[in-house]
Image: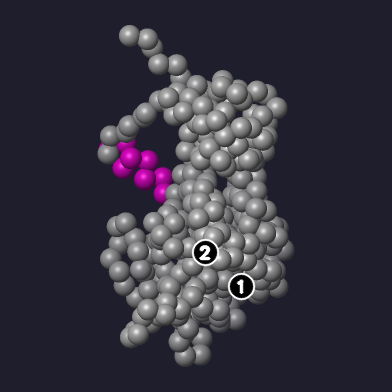
Amino acid sequence: MAKKRVIEDLEDLPGIGPSTAQKLKEAGYGDVSSIATSSAHELAEVAEIGVETAKKAIDAAKEGLEATFETADQVFERRKSIGRITTGSKALDELLGGGVETQAITEAYARFSSGKSQLAFQLSVNVQKPQEEGGLGGKALFIDTEHTFRPDRIAQIAEGAGLNTDEVLKNILVARAENSDHQIILVDKAEELLQNENIKLIVIDSFTSQFRADYIGRGALGERQQKMNKHIHTLQRLADDYNVAVYITNQVMDNPGILFGDPTKPIGGHVLGHASTYRLYLRKSKDEKRIARLVDSPNLPEGECVFKVNKKGVTD
């Protein structure tokens, strides 16, 4: 029986030469597994090759990948390295099982002024604290898609926490995404920073707004969902490979089919619903109070808590 050939480099794939491999790498297809899980049309467009050539490359990538399984105790051992970032509220930390965790995607969806961006700012500050104070002693990577990033608010939160505001601001790397393709590129390029900088948190505020603006109408829905799916899975891979926490915010819309109760539903459909590890629904209450509901989690029960957003940031 012929021994299965293990393909390690993109250039080993049929129809993929050095220049094509370079195009793929620049577009975020850094390894054979990313080729194996892509669509032929998407690959053909990015690499500027024929669809049939793309199909052959994908089939070869699938064939050349080694299927590796781990025992559950190995997975359990690896999960011991998970870290958690405090939200600033003990009640919210408890709801999330100890804070926003690494190797996971935590999504917060809400109407405007409900606290989702404030939580993004707070986590970007708190991740810099030492572990004994609820941080991870690392930097934050912040992708701003709605032009809502405010360094003055970060400075205010840092000051409220008794931290050096200049140092805190220097430890947050910010990029503004001008459209959905730019947002995807920024996340693909983030891997270089994760390799060279002590980044422990990736924030995207908001994940869906640019996709919502770029893909309008039912005809564009399929392509939008496909791109979002690949994008969110890239984030999960980065979270796993580099043991970082990912926090994304999401916009909402009203479900006209709901006659009674809260009609609010998150944008992104099942793609985001299945990909997010922890899903929070935030609502505004009286004055500074906000209500957080844990809607989905693989290991925690649904529940609610109340926290505050004030001048100092997120508190109980």
User: Which residue is found at the position 59% from the left and 65% from the top?
Assistant: 216
Magenta segment: 73-84
Q: In x, y percent, where is residue 314? A: 52, 75
Of circles 2 and 1, which is in front? 2
Is 22 situated left or right of 300 in this image?
A: right
Which is more N-terminal, label 1 or label 2?
Answer: 1
Residue toward you, 209 or 74 = 209
Say which amino acid is labelled 1.
Ile
Q: In which quarter of the image is the C terminus?
A: bottom left
The residue lying at 50 percent from left, 21 percent from top is: 7
What residue appears at the point 65 percent right and 45 percent down from the top-left corner? 189
- Which residue lies most toward the top here? 1
Q: What's the distance in space between the residues labelled 2 and 1, CA to CA? A: 41 Å
Which labelled disc corresponds to residue 157? 1
Q: In this view, does 155 lie above or below 258?
A: above
For disc 1, the neighbor class at 10 Å (few under 14, some 14 to 19, many from 20) is many
Residue 222 coordinates in the image, percent (x, y)? 50, 55
Q: Is mark 1 on a helix, strand or loop?
A: helix
Question: For the residue marked with disc 2, what is the amino acid?
Answer: Arg
> Which element carries disc 2, helix, strand or loop?
helix
Q: Which of 23/41 is in front?
A: 41
For the point 29% across and 57% down, which residue is it?
Answer: 299
Would you place residue 10 above or below residue 37 in this image? above
In this rendering, the answer to whether 205 lies above or below 293 is: above
Left or right of residue 54: residue 236: left
Q: Do the residues labelled 2 and 1 touch (CB within 8 Å)?
A: no
| Residue occupied by mark 2 | 218
Residue 58 image position (x, y, % from top left): 50, 31
Residue 62 belongs to magenta span:
no
82 is within the stretch colored magenta: yes
Q: In which quarter of the image is residue 176?
A: bottom right
Q: Quadrant of the rendered structure where residue 106 is?
A: bottom left
